Image (cartoon, rainbow, N blue to C red):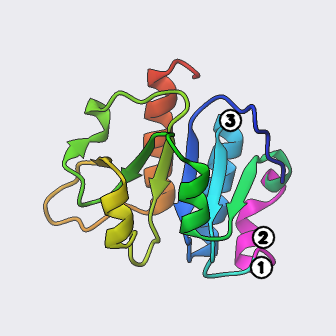
Amino acid sequence: MTHNSTFLGPKIALYEPDIPQNTAAIIRTCACLGARLEIIEPCGFLLSDKRFKRVIMDYLDYSQIKFYQSSEKFFEAKDKQRIVLMTTKGSTNYTKFKFKSDDTILFGRESAGVPKKVHELIQNRLKIPMKNQARSLNIASSVAIVLAESLRQIKLI
């Protein structure tokens, strides 16, 4: 797991992820599409979890992952950088949003999203439109959908 400070491209950030299989699938997606992953701790599992290892396979070797010890450390490091929050409470459709190459796209916990204080810190809150009866997409699917759109917009794929 490496961190390249000169990385140019969108970054995916996970707020205190709690399902190891989802995080592993997101690491694979980021590795395959060339995005850096940022994980805001604490995680609800250990990286040694066998469910995590089963999904991650060898993609950890091809990943750029940065860990933050807390949301406070994350927001300190992101001073003046644009953070985009993906949330079912968002009012803007992600396809109507103009992504920039240095955006950090933040996804909340699978079980609870992000706390209200995080919502209030972020101006850009986007959603993936769904059928009315649907509650939410799997986070790994959501990351793949939004990351692909941001890469398409900034012409990195």
Residue 114 at x, y = what percent?
40, 69
Looking at the rendered image, the disc whose residue lies closer to the viewer, 2 or 3, is: 3
Q: Is residue 21 above or below residue 100?
A: below
Left or right of 24? Residue 119 is left
Residue 82 is marked as none
**Quick one: label 3, few (<14), some, or many (20+) residues within 10 Å?**
many
First reached walking from the N terminus: tag 3 or tag 1: 3
Q: What element carries label 3?
A: loop
Task: Name which residue type carries label 1.
Answer: Lys
Instruction: State the residue at coordinates (43%, 42%).
Output: 146
Give the residues in magenta.
47-59
Q: In this rendering, is residue 144 above or below 60?
A: above
Name the spot of residue 83 as percent of width and height, x first.
45, 46
Q: For the residue carrying disc 2, how many other residues have a C-alpha within 10 Å: few (<14), some (14-19), or many (20+)?
A: some
Q: Can you give x and y, in whole percent of width and height, for residue 37 in the image?
A: 65, 50
Q: The disc labelled 2 sits on which kind of residue? A: Lys
Q: Residue 50 carries which label?
A: 1
Q: Is the magenta stretch mostly helix, strand or loop?
A: helix
Q: Name the residue under label 2.
A: 53
Residue at point 22%, 43% (across, down): 92
Extreme residue in the top direction = 155
Q: State which mark lies toward you, 3 or 1.
A: 3
Identify the element where label 1 is drawn: helix
Residue at left 51%, top 40%? 81
- Residue annotated with mark 3: 34
Asked if disc 2 and disc 1 are in contact, CB closer than 8 Å, the reply is yes
Q: Is residue 156 left or right of residue 62?
A: left
Instruction: Give yes or no for residue 94 being in the magenta stretch.
Output: no
